[in-house]
Amino acid sequence: MLRTPLAIALMVWIAACGSPPGPGEIEGAAVPDAVVRARAERQAAPAAQRAAELDVHAGQILFGDLHVHTSWSYDAFMNSLPMMQGEGLHPAADACDFARYCADLDFWSINDHAGTISPRAWAETRESIRQCNARAGDPDSPDLISLVGWEWTQVGRTSEDHYGHKNVVLRGTADDELPARPIAASSARAFEGVMDYRGMFVEQLKMPLFDLANVGPYLDAIAVMRELGAPERCPDGVDTRELPADCREVAMHPGELADKLEQWGFDHLIIPHGTAWGWYTPPGSSYDHQLEARNRPESQGLFEIYSGHGNSEEYRPWRSAVHGPSGELVCPEPTADYTPCCWRAGELIRERCEDPGSAECEDRVRRAREYHMDLGPGGHLAVSGESVEDWLDCGQCRDCFLPAFHYRPAQTAQYALALSSFDDAGDAAPRRFRFGFIGSSDNHTARPGTGYKEYERIKMTEAKGPRDQKWIERMYVRGEPSPEPVPRSAVSVAFPETTFFDKERGGSFFMTGGLVAAHARARDRDALWEALEQREVYATSGPRILLWFDLLDGPGRAAHPMGSEVTLAGTPRFRVRAAGAFVQKPGCPEHAQAALEPGRLEYLCRGECYHPGDRRQRIERIEIVRIRPQLRPDEPVAGLIEDPWLAHDCPPDPDGCTLEFEDPGFAAGGREVIYYARVLQEPTPAVNGGGLRCVRDADGSCVEARPCYSDPRTPPDDDCLADVAERAWASPIFVRWQAPALAAHDAAP
C-alpha cells in the first residue's frame, strides 16, 4: 500500500502533521464547604464509637485513587481514537474535574507511563496538578488533594527479567520538590521488539488511510510518536540530579528506580500493581526474585491489591507454566479447578488432526504447547484461526473474586507476603515484604475513582475495542485455521496492544476501579502522606466501605492499627469494625450540577455521580487471613497461607459489624505471623462481574464461554452485570514472635 511515489509523498506529509495532546482546562471550582464536611459526617457515628471503645483518635477516612492515566499515556491516547470507539482526548484537566465532581474523591494522583511522557508533557503535568490544587479551597482542609506521579512500566521477556508495573507517587508539587524527569523502565528486551516505537510509527502511518473521515486524531497520534522519539537516552551511571533535564532516563530494575528516587531526596512511594494480571506477565512468573536485595523490596511500602484490571490478592497452587529440571518452561497438566492455556492450545491443535492418536498429531500438540509458552502473553497466536470462545476459561482463576485476566498466582499479595529471602541474612532476620494494601482504578480516560457506581462499561472501564467489523478484522488478525501450530518467528502483528496482548479475550475482565482509603488524623496533605507512609490504609473494590483493624493492647485499648509491625510473646488479640457503603441515588447531586456546565458534566460523568443516600449496604461477612512467612527456603508456600483462617457471619445490622478475636496458637508456633481482615458486602450487580460467563457442566468445567466483548459484538449498553460481594481489605498487621524471658529462679540450677 505504501510503496508508490504518491504513497511515499503522503507518508512524508502525514509525518509532519498533527500535534500531541495538552493539559486541557480545569473548569470546576472548589466543592462547597458543606459538601466537604458532609464526607466526614457520614463517617462520624462508627468512627466516634470506635474511638470511645478503644480510647483512640477518631480521625477521618479519606478516599482516593493513586493510579490514573490521561491521554499523555500512549495506550490511553490510542484508546481515545475513533477506531477504538474513543471519546477523544482525556487530558489532566478532565481528571481534576472528574475526581472533584463525578467521583467526589478526597485525593488522587496522576500516573502516566513514564516512557510516554515527553519533556513538554512532564512540565505540563506538574503545572496541571498545581492548578488542580489551587482550586481546592482552604489548604488546611482542601476538597481535593492532587499528587504528582508516573508509572514505571516494565515488562520482561521471561519470568526471570520481569518486574512488572510500579507507580511512583510524590509528596511535593513545586518544581524544586519533584524530579526533573520521570524515570522509565527499559523495554529493550520486552517481547523482542514487539513494542518498539519505531516499528509502531511505520504502522501508524497507515491509520489515517484506513479512516480518512476522522484523519485528525490519527495525525495527532503520529505526532505523539514523533515527540516521544526525539529525546536521547540519558547516560548510565550518572547521578540523576546531574543529568540533562530533557533526556530519557531509564531504570533497569526496581532497585535502580529506588536508588534514583533516593538521589533526588524527595518523599515518594513506589507501589507495585497489576501483579497477577497475565495480560503482559510471562507464564511461570513469580515474586521470588523481587525479594532479592538489589531490587530494594523495602522501598515498596504499598501494594495495589485491586484495580479495574482485577484482583491480585489470592494465592492458588496451580501455575500457567512450570520450570523443568534444566530451567526450561514446561506446560503443566490441568487440575480440577484450572486449565493452563498452553495445554488448551495443544488440545485445539489436536482437534484439527485427521488422526488425533497419531505420533504426528502428538508432535503438533507438543509444539503448540511449547510455542504458546514461548510467545508468553501472546500465546494465543500459537493457534491460527482460533476464536475467543475456543479457549473456554483456560488461564483464569475460577474461584477468585473478580480475578485479573490470565491469573498468575505466584505474583499475588498473599504469595509475596509468605516469602522469605535468606540470601546474605547471616544471623539477621530473613528479608520479607512489608507492604500495606491499596485499591485504585488504573483508569485510562482521566477518570479517578470510577467504582462509585456500576454503569457505562465502555466509558468507565478499560473495555475498549474496535468500533466496527472492519476494524475488528484489521486488529484481531488470526489467519486461517491450520493443523500446524505457529512459532514466534512466524508471528507478525500490526497492532501489538490489541493483537499480541490478548485484549480481545481480556475485555471480559475489565471492571470499574478500586479505591485507597487512608486513616488520616486531619484533612490535609501532610496527614494523608503520613497515613500512606505508615500503611494505615486499606483497599476497596470501589464502594466506600468503612473499615478499622486494630491489634488490642488490653481491654478497651487499641495499640496498633492496620499496617503496624509488632513484637509479642503472648497471645495477640484483634478487633475489626466495618460499615457498608451508602446505597447510591441516581444522577448527580445539586452541587455537581451547579459546578460544571451540562455538556461537560455529561461528557465526564455520563449522567451519574457519587450521590449517597441514607442507607448503608449490609456487611455480610468478616474474614481473617493468616500468613506465616517461610522459616526456611524450601518451606512450601501453600501451607503457609490460611485463607480464610477465621470467618464470621455478620448479623443483619445496618450500622455494620464488629469482630474481636485472638490467636491462641501464636506463641506456640514460635514464628512471625501476618494477619489481615477482609470484609464482604451483600452481593450487588457489578460490571463484568461474570468474567467469561461460562456455561459449566456438573463437574464445574467450562463447556461454553460467552465473552463480554469490548466491541460491537456485545451491545455497548450491555454492562455485563453480575452479582458480586464487593469488599475491602485491611492492610496487614505484622506480628513478630519473641520468646519470653526466663525468670531468674527458672534459670537457676
Image (tube, rainbow, N blue to C red):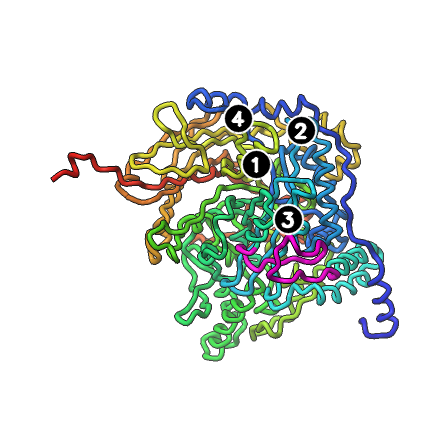
Task: Of the two numbered discs 3 and 1 on the same chain, state the one appearing first in sequence.
Answer: 3
Q: Which mark is residue 529?
A: 1
* Label 1, label 2: how far apart the Cα atoms are: 15 Å
Q: Could you say whether the residue bearing mark 2 is in a helix, strand or loop?
A: loop
Residue corresponding to mark 4: 59
Which residues, given as a range, are shown in magenta? 229-256
Residue 144 position within the rendered picture, expressed as x and y whole percent measured from the top left: 66, 32
Q: Quadrant of the N terminus?
A: bottom right
Q: Pointer 2 and pointer 3: residues touching (CB < 8 Å)?
A: no
- The answer to whether 699 is drawn above or below residue 575 in the figure is below
* Label 3, label 1: how far apart the Cα atoms are: 17 Å
Name the amino acid type tagged 4.
Gly
Name the amino acid type tagged 2.
Pro
Residue corresponding to mark 3: 150
Residue corresponding to mark 2: 139
Name the amino acid type tagged 3.
Trp
Q: Residue at x 85, y 74 (%)?
A: 4
Task: Of the two numbered discs 2 and 4 on the same chain, state the one appearing first in sequence.
Answer: 4
Residue 260 position within the rendered picture, expressed as x and y whole percent measured from the top left: 58, 53
